[in-house]
Structures are given as C-alpha cells and as structure tokens.
Image (spheres, rainbow, N blue to C red):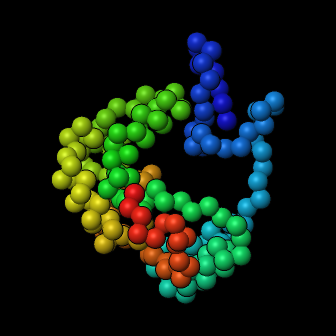
Amino acid sequence: MRRQDENGELYSLPGTDGCDYIDAETFEIIPCANFYDKNVHEVRLASMRGNQEALEMYQNWFENVIENLPGVHHYSWMNIERKIKTYKNFWSKHWQSLYNIPQEDTIENNMFFNKKWEDVTQEDIEHLAARLSSEMGGWVFHQKVDFSKPTPSITIKRQEPEVMLGFKL
C-alpha cells in the first residue's frame, strides 16, 4: 500500500485511505475480521436498485450487527454543511498528498457541484446540504451527486449514545 517517488518520499497507493492497519516491521497489511460479505453486499446493491424486500433485509441485518457487535460511532456526516466544507478545504488536498497524484480544481473533479471548488460559495454549500439532508438517503462521492437517483435509506432504531444527544458538530 506504499510506494516511493523519485525523491525517495513515501506515498500511499490508491485503495487505502491512509488509516489501514499495517505491521510496523514488515509493512504488510494486517487482516481484520469482517462481517460484511458478498451476500450482504448483493442485498445492499439490490436495495439500492429499488428492491423493497432487499432494503428491509439489509436494514434488519444492519440493526442486528450494531446490536450484537462492538462498534465505533462515526459522526462525520451528522453536520452535512461541515462535511462539504471539509471536502472543499481539506480532502482534495489530502488525497493529492496521500497518493502523490496532482488533481486540478476542475468541474469534473468536484463531485458535489458542477463548478470548480474555488467558485463554490457558502450559499451553494448551505443549499446543497439542505437538499442532501431532505432528498437523499446518502451518497458515495466517487461520482457526482445525482438527485434523480436518491439512495434508499434505512432507519436504525438504536438511539445515539447519550453523550451525543443534542450535540451539534
């Protein structure tokens, strides 16, 4: 998951987000147990194509997982406006640094807006955050946001940890 450039500087290969577990001596990937398998993935994909029965199966499976396995609560999307600003001001630069791949600020490289990041205003961000919150079930930003294809949502019955109740990120 790492390479050296012509100056001997280390960088990561695409496919890692920079936080994989790596053996400090051998630099080999440390495998981890995973409960998400090909069958679950196929059910999730079917649910995303509009199969309501698959969506219910996926929701039941997911609720069972979070009820029975230890987990980490990830809150980076609790404040969508903040998350979009993070993409604008940090993530593009981070990926360039992590992968040693230059990436220009172009319309094609902005998965949120049909404009360069430098042309995105605070008002644009607030408007998109409101639309994402009310119209989409989620989105994987490897492709441009497409409001004509909302992602089906699941509802988790489990309550947030008490420490997070009412907390605004």
Above or below, comparing residue 29 to residue 100 in the picture: below
Q: Residue at x 54, y 32 (%)?
A: 99
Observer able to see residue 31 = yes
Spot occupied by residue 62 in the image (x, y as percentages of width and height):
61, 75
Above or below, comparing residue 155 to residue 21 in the picture: below
Q: Residue at x 46, y 79 (%)?
A: 50
Observer able to see residue 55 = no
Residue 49 horizontal side relative to residue 104, left or right: right
Most extreme residue toward the right, as rendered?
25
Marks counted in the figure total 0
Spot occupied by residue 58 in the image (x, y as percentages of width and height):
59, 78
Above or below, comparing residue 105 to residue 79 in the picture: above
Q: Closest to the observer: 73 or 55? A: 73
Q: Residue at x 38, y 61 (%)?
A: 168
Q: Closest to the observer: 105 or 74? A: 74
Residue 89 horizontal side relative to residue 128, left or right: right
Above or below, comparing residue 161 to residue 102 in the picture: below
Indicate the quadrant containing the C terminus: top left, top right, bottom left or bottom right: bottom left
